[in-house]
Amino acid sequence: MGQSGSDGPRGSALLTSSFAEDPAYAGLIRRFIAGMPERIREIECAVDASDVDRLRVVAHQLKGAAPGYGFETIGAAAGAVEAGIEGHAPASIEHVRDDVRVLIERCRSTLPGQGANAA
Amino acid sequence: MTPQTSHSGQDVPARVLVIDDCVDLHRLLKVRLGAEGYEMIEAVGGEDGLMRARRDTPDVVLLDLEMPGLDGFEVLRALKEDPRLQDVPVIVLSGLDSPGDKVTAFDLGAIDFVGKPFDMAELRARVRSALKISSLMRMLEQRAQLDGLTGLWNRAYFETQWANEAKRARRHDHPLSLAIVDIDRFKDVNDSYGHPAGDAVIQGLARLFQRELRGSDIACRYGGEEFALVMPETSPSSALALCERIREEFGALSWPRHPGRGVTFSCGIAGARGGVPVDPADWVEIADSNLYAAKRSGRDRSIMTDLTPEPGIRQAS
Ligand SMILES: [Mg+2]
């Protein structure tokens, strides 16, 4: 069940779903990964616009859904972003900049050709 | 309507309504729960979810809490306030997982609470369990409203349904009729041929009602040998014609336990061709007094009162 790939700060090997061997998930995982660039863009836009509310919603949803596709570490990273925002009132992007970086790296490492190997 | 023992969930696939603002989650559940044979309905927000629930009456709802617009708590409250939807089990599926959120969800009527992220096998098991519980609840509720001897609705059911039908007919200015039927000299049957013979007569008449009444009619065992027939969208004259047909059929039946002794019934009818300002209890009393008039004037007959403004009394025998 373990996920392959390290989550080191400077790029990483390809992150694959823990359900990758389950044929029932093949199509689901493919579509989930296909949506990844859009999800990353959404996170980056929220950060650029200092839109904490938007960032929290995206993180909240990823926390809930990514593990269902077998990407538990993405769910955990998204949970950290959400918790970081909720732990500060009023929250600002600055409070979660590191957590967001980890989240984006993990999202990006699901994309073939985006990991350290390709860099 | 005569009682049904089967219910949804047997031959028809159960309908699962997912209300969640996360598209990834819909995609996942559609495939993974859809594979279980459920009919999946998607709503991406609270307003949409309520609309779909009202339109499609699902068998179970999976409800997210955190959504823009109408949130999950508000949707849950609205579902539980809707008489048609309040018994639909709602499983809250949420990333909010503080004890306070859980308590609120259960207090508002959720049947279960599953935190996000969730394990798919566990969610599937919880959906199955919610469907099973709600089907057992339905069965219990229905059984409490059924008469054991005949399988018709019982008096308790009659009381609530009659009040509802009377209210509806008045509001929409629709026809409605009520008949009260009593088997003639029933005590004689019991005394002469024994209680099993009496039971057979009661069951025979119940079968006749089940065969002759339409789907929208409600046949109830009102008391020992007394029955009440609620006939929505039926004018008093149509109700009279129907009861007369049943009365003639019943009188012509031959009974295996007493082949030489036929049985008859008397019937009191009160109905209206449109909405009338008559209290439901008074309405029952009018039908009842017609029944006693039928008894007094020789039995084996129906007496009807048309409650629509120019009232008239007609007798048939
Ligand atoms: Mg949500």
Image (tube, rainbow, N blue to C red):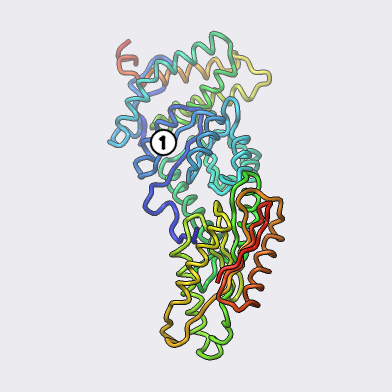
- Name the one closer to the observer, A43 or B255: B255
Q: Residue furthest top?
A: A48
Estimate the x, y position of residue B262 in percent, counting from the top left: 47, 82
Q: Residue at x 43, y 43 (%)?
A: B15
Estimate the x, y position of residue B250 in percent, counting from the top left: 47, 74
Q: Is residue B166 above or below residue B117?
A: below
**Pointer 1 residue Cβ closer than 8 Å to ligand 1:** no
- Quadrant assignment for the C terminus of chain B: bottom right
Apparent side of residue A95 relative to residue B201 in the rendered image (left or right): right
Chain ID, mark 1 = B
Q: Residue furthest bottom?
A: B192
| Residue B87 in view of the camera | yes
Residue behind mark 1: B29
The amino acid type, in three-letter code, at marker 1 is: Leu
Q: Residue at x 59, y 51 (%)?
A: B175
- Name the one closer to the observer, A82 or B24: B24
Give the quarter of the image for residue B47: top right
Estimate the x, y position of residue A2 in percent, counting from the top left: 36, 34
Q: Is residue B197 above or below residue A75?
A: below
Apparent side of residue B57 relative to residue A117 in the rendered image (left or right): right
